[in-house]
Image: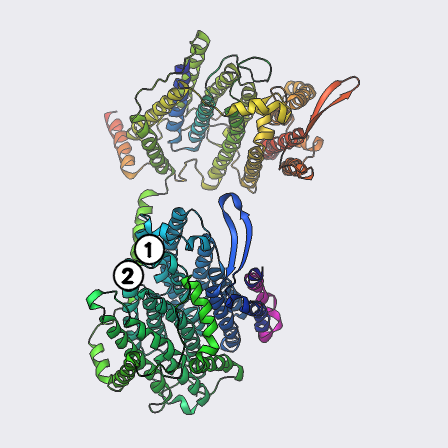
Amino acid sequence: MNVFWILLLPILGIMAPLLAARLGRSACAWATAVAPFAALVILMQQTNGVFAGQVDAFSMEWIPVLGLNVELHLDGLAYLFALLILGIGLLVILYARYYLSEQDSMPKFYAYLMLFMVAMLGIVLSNNLIQLWFFWELTSISSFLLISFWSHRTDARKGARMALTITGAGGLALLAALLMIGHVTGTYQLDEVLGMSDVVHASGYYPAILVLFLLGAFTKSAQFPFHFWLPHAMAAPTPVSAYLHSATMVKAGIFLMARFFPLLADTDAWFIVVSLTGMATLLVGAYTALFKHDLKGLLAYSTISHLGLITLLLGLGSQLAAIAAVFHVINHAIFKASLFMAAGIIDHESGTRDMRKLNGLFKYMPITATLAMVAAASMAGVPLLNGFLSKEMMFAETLNQYTLGALSWWIPLLATVGGALSVAYSLRFMHDVFFNGEPIGLPKTPHEPPRYMRVPVEVLVVLCLLVGIFPQFVVGDLLNAASSAVLQTRLPEFHLHIWHGFNVPLAMSAVAITVGSMLYIKRRHLFHFQGQFNEMDAKMIFEGLVQRTVRVATAIQNWLDTDSLQRAMFLLLLLALAMVSYPLLSMDSVEGSRPQIPTNWVVTFCTGLLIVSTILTVWWSHRRLRALLALSVVGLVVSIAFAYFSAPDLALTQLSVEVVTILLFLLALFFLPQHSPALDSSLRKIVRDLGIAAMFGSVVGTICYAMLTRPLHSISEFFLANSKSGGGGTNVVNVILVDFRGFDTLGEITVLGIAALGIYKLLARITLAMPTANSDGIPWSKESHPVLLALISQSLLPLALLVSAYIFLRGHNMPGGGFIAGLITAIALIQQYVAHGVEWMKQRMPINYQGLIASGLCIAILSGVGSWFFGHNFLKTWYDYFYLPGIGKFELASAMVFDLGVYLTVIGATLLILANLGKMTTSERLRGGQE
Amino acid sequence: MEFSFALGVGFLAGAGVFLMLRGQTFPVILGLTLLSYAVNLFLFASGRLMIDGAAILGTADAYSDPLPQALVLTAIVIGFAMTAFVIILAIRARTDLGNDQVDGRESSLTNGELLDRKYRKDVKEAKR
């Protein structure tokens, strides 16, 4: 449970800086620090338990059906990383308080920082693969926000984009790997998965899993050849660099490799890929770092190099190497964060990061200089400092491996070269910046930073010394706990001592320091040598690639989408045709085994009528009123077909919808041209369209025939059997609508309401060109409301309403229901609109149709919610039978309330559409007549 | 009987598709309506055809399949909402753009086609 709070407190803490924004800068920083501090205290309380090997786990059901749960756990490795994330996070919060200028939005920065902290904590505490991946992607997004914090700068935006692209793509690869792992092992729970190394190794997926997994880890941890995003991410404010790009985010990849070490390691593929990548990164990073003039650039490449070192250790495969890797994670986080902060101080107080200008700063800022030099010495691996210990362990382990068979001696040799290079660039950092003459043309005179800005650096440097001098006492237990979590077995014996006696690793260290110093002293020759090569700028390549991708995508899009609906429709239909026809080609015969109903003259006549009126609709489509007449015949035949084939509910619905649709079409014709040009497109196009229409029609007809003549295995037996007993109604169609599939119906009436509101919005503030005559020049009739029609429709209204009430009430047991009753009521009311006009209706029926839709939806939803109070599921029907004298026995069902909601929504939507369109015609025309 | 039904559905679908490919809004809406008739009938057909089947429990031995009917019933109403939306969209487009072309341009013909047509017109006049 405690582990839950460690994650939850920082999540709540994201809001803290935003809420405290008005209280001033210091208050904002303090408010931000509260949540991580509390989380750190809780974490510390777990220390004894974790060191004793206990795992604090938390599990909460989220979507149990899909196996998605919130799973957290706190073991040694998670403890170590959480400690780094929270501890260094707190120092960075303090540091950023003094680093950010007045112009920077501090609450925004802190909120992003907290978001990132949550994401990192989520990664290390997750006990579920998908959940882990979710937080993994969250780190990519939050780091994008942090790198682009100074969004007015081009390099910040581009750097952020590059980081997001690389780590985001890696994240997708990781997702694929995790899904495959879940598929192979059958579970997404991390601690269960880790124990199934045999299953994963034995499955054929293992190579794919390994490659994708390592892609994810390597991109995040800036391993060669994906390392180039990290130096460009240095456009971020320095606190971000110190936190994300040295201590935490880039370690996420390392964390992942350590976490999955028991699952995926222990194969030759792992050893070779991981160790060689690590070695390449180590060398490339260290060599490039030497030539960087930018202080942060040097540190960025040095970070890449040290990440390579850790990866190399994880790739060596021995248990002691894994322990050394964990140890170096701690050490690197400590000294590199302090170095970044020192670099930030130098930048802040002297105005530049260029080492060609920065010289002799020691006398301006002696304390900062001393701190930075201690940290840099640790980076170089000087004895009595923490960097020395893990580097020594690394050297020892490189001697102890057989990865490359007879050529395995390459690895210790190259490791020594890497060590020498790291000594050289550390020396450059110390000597160039703090000594080496006088500063050249600095924008401002450097001086010591504000007191508290230095505190984080001091804390970290003291840690460097403490770990370096009393390693066993300070980090022994922590390393023990974290390493046993990595290896998941009993640890081999290891000792953290400063002095191991005169041995080969010590000699390698001595060689590295000597050669490194030589390299630095003779650096002029080296710089001259390097100057002969053109510097390969990864940014240019990357930007070029991005632009090429965008160009290709734009070209494809321009080809597909030419702003023409006709063309888009044509391509879509062609695609649909191709996809639908393909399975038909492999079908043996169209006709199936189901016995067919013998045809008769009624059916033949109706089919003929349907076909003729369909053709006439097309033929007359340029004489629009005639086309509409033909269309209404089609609609009538369809209604008859429904009635004939035993679907009375459908026939009723189709008939009433038909009336409303045709009315709507007629209204629309008032505003649209009544004629189209006879030949609206070229003959070639018409022939082409006829061809595709014929093919489409024949394919649809064939599928329909094939389906009709094949036997049916329907799930409807269930509905027929349970309609009466479960839903209390004998009209199965209606019971399905309001009970079995009530949730669908709720969705559908919502769509209806949304469509009506959309129409309302479309009609708002429309400027209509009001025709006074039709296109043949015949003026519209002045008498818009004939008396006869008015009289008849008025006397029909009560009757129509009675019918609709009857249809509504009997709906549960006989054909009818809310949809049909709603449509009938709507038609009765529309008839009044047609006969009397909108103004007349408005006076007599002042109803707001939007409100009607809303109340209908509310009633429907409430009737569903109501069943919760009786302990049932949403929309579960309740019904019972009652007896009233004079009426007799009758049934009441809660489904009727739902149906009432449907009824009201249908009326509201239909009238909102028609009355609004109708309103435009009448009022405008009246005004036109007065003029 | 099945054949007649399928024939009707096929005709409706084909005519709908042809009209949907026209350049003006009104025929496109007509086409959409025809196509939704076809789709509704097609969905209904997935329950197979039955004459004199019972829609109400206890009125006959053989029941027509209620599930496609329930689905089609809502589809009809939603189809109406869609048709209405497209009609109003067409009216709005006409008032905003000044024409009733689906692409919002006066003519959806390409330059070549326009030239063709002009050429034919010229030929006709020359003959006169």
Numbered range of the magenta stretch: A7-27
Is most of the magenta stretch helix, strand or loop? Answer: helix
Upstream in the sequence, badge 2 or badge 1? 1
Indicate whether A631 appears above or below A407: above
Q: Quadrant of residue A231?
A: bottom left
Residue at numbered disc 2:
A273
Report the residue at 48% width, 72% height from top.
A477
The type of residue carrying mark 1 is: Leu
Report the residue at 55% width, 15% height from top.
B54
Q: Is residue A883 left or right of residue A344?
A: right
Disc 1 chain ID: A
- Indicate the position of residue A170 as horizontal and vertical percent values: 36, 57
For marks 2 and 1, give the CA distance. Answer: 10 Å
- Indicate the position of residue A722 as horizontal and vertical percent values: 59, 24
Among all residues in the image, which is located at the extreme right?
Answer: A885
Q: Which mark is residue A210?
A: 1
Both marks 2 and 1 on one chain: yes
The quadrant in which the C terminus of chain B is found is top left
Magenta includes A16? yes
Describe the element under mark 1 as helix, strand or loop.
helix
Among all residues in the image, which is located at the extreme top?
Answer: A601
Q: Nearer the viewer, residue A404 or B101?
A: A404
- Indicate the position of residue A908 as horizontal and vertical percent values: 62, 33
The type of residue carrying mark 2 is: Val
Report the residue at 34% width, 86% height from top.
A432
Indicate whether A202 appears above or below A379: above
